[in-house]
Image: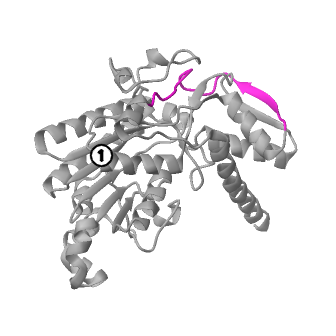
Amino acid sequence: MNLDNRQFESLVLDSNRYLHKSIGSSSLSAIHAKTVLVAGGGGFIGGHLVGSLLKSGHEVRCVDIKPMGEWYQTFDRAENVSADLQDYYNCEAACQDVSTVYNLAADMGGMGFIENNKALCMLSVLINTHLLMASKKTSVDKFFFASSACVYNADKQESPDVIPLKESDAYPAMPEDGYGWEKLFSERMCRHFEEDFGIQTRVARFHNVYGPNGTWHGGREKAPAAICRKVLEAIESGSNEIEIWGDGNQTRSFTYISDCLYGIERLMESNFSNPINLGSSELTTINGLVDIVEEIAGVKLKREYNLSAPKGVNGRNSDNELIQRTLDWAPSIALKEGMRKTFDWIKQEFTLQNSKAQMV
C-alpha cells in the first residue's frame, strides 16, 4: 500500500483497532511484546533482515520509501508500508507499539552514487534523527543503527597496504564526504539518546556488505555486484573486456550478507553500546575481486582501467579484535564462497532481464 504521510499516521496510530483486526485480541499483548520495526526494509540488507526476524518468530513492521513493487524482497507475514521516514510524523507512526527499531534506511549506493550525491546522502540524517525522537516518545526499548566503514579517517586509508581499521580510528574525524559524515553524526546521536533518554542503542559499522537480492545495475550497485554484471555483459556482448574503476590496486574487505545478519543478532543480544566493526577481515584488491569472478564465470577478460572514475580510498579493512573479544565471533564466510552465490543470483537476474528485453 502506498500512503501519504497523514494516511500512514492515521493507520498506525490507531494501532489497537488495526492490530485487533489483523490478528485478534487474544494475542495482542504477546504480539506487541515482540513487534520490531525495520526501517529501510525494502532495501538489500533490510529485506534479508526482515526475513531473518520473521523466521525467528518476531512480528515485523517493514517501512521503506520505495513503492512495494520496487522492494528487493517482500514477505506476506510482515506489515509492509511504503512511507518516507525523513518525515517525523511517519517515524512516530511507524514506532507505535514497537519494542525494537532497526534503522537501515538511507539514500545511498556504491562509490559512484556516494561521490556524486553528497547532499542526498547527508539528508539521511533526518531519518535517524526523527526515528530516535519517535523512539523516545513511544518508549522504544532498543535501537539499532546501521553505520558504515565510511566513517573512518581518510588519512588512515591512503595506502592499499592499509592497517586494519580499529573503531577508535574514526577520530579525529575525517570521514567520507557526505555519506560518511552523515553516518558519523548519526552514531553520535545514538550515543547521546542513550545517555540522556535511556534508549539502548547499538551501532554496527558495515564493511561492504554483498550478496543475492541486492542492487546489481542502475548506478547504485557496489563493487561485487558491479563486477559480476560487467563480466556477464562482456560474455554476452563478446567484447571480452571489462572496465575497472581506478587502477584496480585499491584494497577492500567484503562481508557476505549472512555474516552481517548474524552479527546484527549477536550485537543486539549483547550489552555493548559503542560502535563496532561488522566486516570481514579478508583483504583483497579490486583486481583480485575481478580474478575471483572470472574464475567463477570461467573466462579471462582484457582489463581497461578508468582512472577518472570514482574509486574511493586506496585501502580499507576491518580490524575485528573488538568484535571477537566482545561477541566471541567475527564474520567468516570466505569471499570466494560468497561471490559464487552472488554471481549465480545475478546471472539469473541478468538472463531474465535479457529475456524480457527480447520479448519487447
Seen from the viewer's position, the closer of residues 324 and 193 is 324
Residue type at the position of mark 1: Ser
Main SS category, magenta section: loop
Residue at 20% x, 69% y: name it.
Answer: 13
* Left/right of residue 239 with respect to residue 284 in the rendered view: right
Count every numbered label the image shows and give the total: 1
Quadrant where the image shows the N terminus:
bottom left
* Left/right of residue 116 with respect to residue 168 in the rendered view: right
Q: Secondary structure at mark 1?
A: loop
Q: Position of residue 74 (x, y in %)?
A: 48, 67
Q: Residue furthest right?
A: 238
Q: Position of residue 104 (x, y in %)?
A: 39, 49
* Left/right of residue 139 with respect to residue 101 in the rendered view: left
Q: Position of residue 185 (x, y in %)?
A: 29, 32
Residue at 26% x, 85% y: name it.
Answer: 24
The span picked out in magenta is 300-320
Residue 104 makes an appearance in the image: no
Residue at 83% x, 46% y: name it.
Answer: 235
Seen from the viewer's position, the closer of residues 163 and 181 is 163
Seen from the viewer's position, the closer of residues 20 and 219 is 20
Examine the rendered structure and indicate whether residue 44 appears above or below residue 147: below
Residue 290 makes an appearance in the image: yes
Q: Quadrant of residue 203?
A: top left
Q: Provide the residue designation for mark 1.
A: 270
Seen from the viewer's position, the closer of residues 20 and 328 is 328
The stretch drawn in magenta includes residue 315: yes
Q: Position of residue 267 (x, y in %)?
A: 35, 45
Examine the rendered structure and indicate whether residue 126 appears above or below residue 36: above
Quadrant where the image shows the C terminus:
bottom right
* Left/right of residue 85 with respect to residue 114 in the rendered view: left
